[in-house]
Image: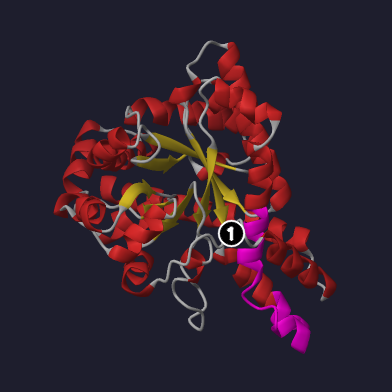
Amino acid sequence: MNDRLTALSAAGVSVWLDDISRQRLHSGGLKRLVDESSVVGVTSNPTIFAKAVSERDDYTEQIDDLKLRGVSLEEAVRAITTYDIRWAADVLLPVYDRTGGVDGRVSIEVDPRLAHECERTVAEARALWWLVDRPNTLIKIPSTMDGLPAITGAISEGISVNVTLIFGLDRYDAVMDAYLSGLERAQQEGIDLSTIHSVASFFVSRVDTEVDRRLDEIGTDEAKGLRSKAAIANARVAHERYSRVIASGRWQSLAKAGANPQRPLWASTSVKDPDLPDTMYVTELVTDGTVNTMPEATIEATGDHGEIRGDTVSTRYDDGHEVLDALAKVGIDYDDVIDTLEREGVEKFEKSWLELLETVRAELS
């Protein structure tokens, strides 16, 4: 095992790989990351699948079979993606067993075109839960306003959920409330709460990308001095809100009934600005009971030169507030930033999903 990644894990951060492809599964690459790089989970999204299917021939045999069977395009895409998720879940099953279900998790996203349709999102979550049929699966549901009741609905049925596309603090509060509401409903239905798991994927680097663009437009020295500080500050304040929920009587009652906390997951942690340290969104967001999902390049960079300096989140809440306050003073409209990021995030995944559909359509024709 790599010493730096081992130190990150020892600090309470679960290392998850933000990538999946059949080539990685065929080659044993995923298992090597589990064995050598402390990887204990996998996340996927429409962009990842679109890239995997378009660039590799590992899917040709399955697509040929689907073509012979005359399946619909939608069914073909579900068959292709759930096949990879099942395989990855089987690779990670020993981790799942060793950690009592906390890690060893593999995430698959509902059709992003349903982001604003609650009932259809829940139906899709049920279908994916059934199709993958692995206990260490997480179904990804976006944290849109229409996604919030879908999160509650899926959790209430015992479906484990990865809530994705969280950018803002108020929306994160709503996500945590949706999870607790789902647990309360599941408890009323007699479902064993210990079987339900969830993570809340709080996006990081995209916040800096959008805020830094606006700071450059403002152009003052004060604004320039705040570049590349918003994302980490935002994440630290989000964790502070999580800590308050965990200390609440509402959560404590559910915990006594066997419920698992909805762990904060730092997503989008590859650095987009080449002038920044390539491990910044890892080393500056270390705290116990969290997940950091990274592309392989960021995992390798952390293993090579990432400096793990203990808790850099719960000891820095005040710093987070100070940065957010300073951003407001120079004219950054936080709510508009968050609205923009959510809209663009949904649009990006919708576009990738359509690219995936078109790629498979071409192969089926």
Residue 79, given in percent of the width and then of the height, sits at 30, 36
Quarter of the image for residue 331 reads bottom right
Rate crowding at label 1 as few (under 14), some (14 to 19) or many (20 or more) other CA atoms within 10 Å.
Answer: many
Dividing the image into 4 quarters, which one contains the N terminus? bottom left
Q: Which residues are magenta?
A: 214-238
Residue 105 lies within the magenta run: no
Residue 270 lies, with reference to residue 127, above or below; the image says below
| Left or right of residue 178, residue 96 in this image | left
| Residue 81, position as x, y percentages in the image | 33, 42
Q: Dot 1 corresponds to which residue?
A: 313
Image coords of residue 258 (percent x, y): 51, 23
Q: Is residue 150 visible?
A: no
Image-based side of 221 in relation to 72, left or right? right
Looking at the image, is 218 positioned above or below residue 160?
Answer: below
Q: Main secondary structure of the magenta part?
A: helix
At 57% from the left edge and 16% from the top edge, which residue is drawn? Answer: 187
Q: Is residue 107 above or below residue 254?
A: below
Q: Secondary structure at mark 1?
A: loop
Residue at the spot 16% in from the left edge and 50% down from the top edge: 26
- In depth, the one of 197 and 254 nearer the eye is 254
User: Is 153 in front, or is 9?
Assistant: 9
Q: From the viewer's perspective, is 4 left or right of 241? A: left
Q: Residue at x 44, y 71 (%)?
A: 279
Amino acid at circle 1:
Val
Name which residue lies at 24% across and 37% down.
94
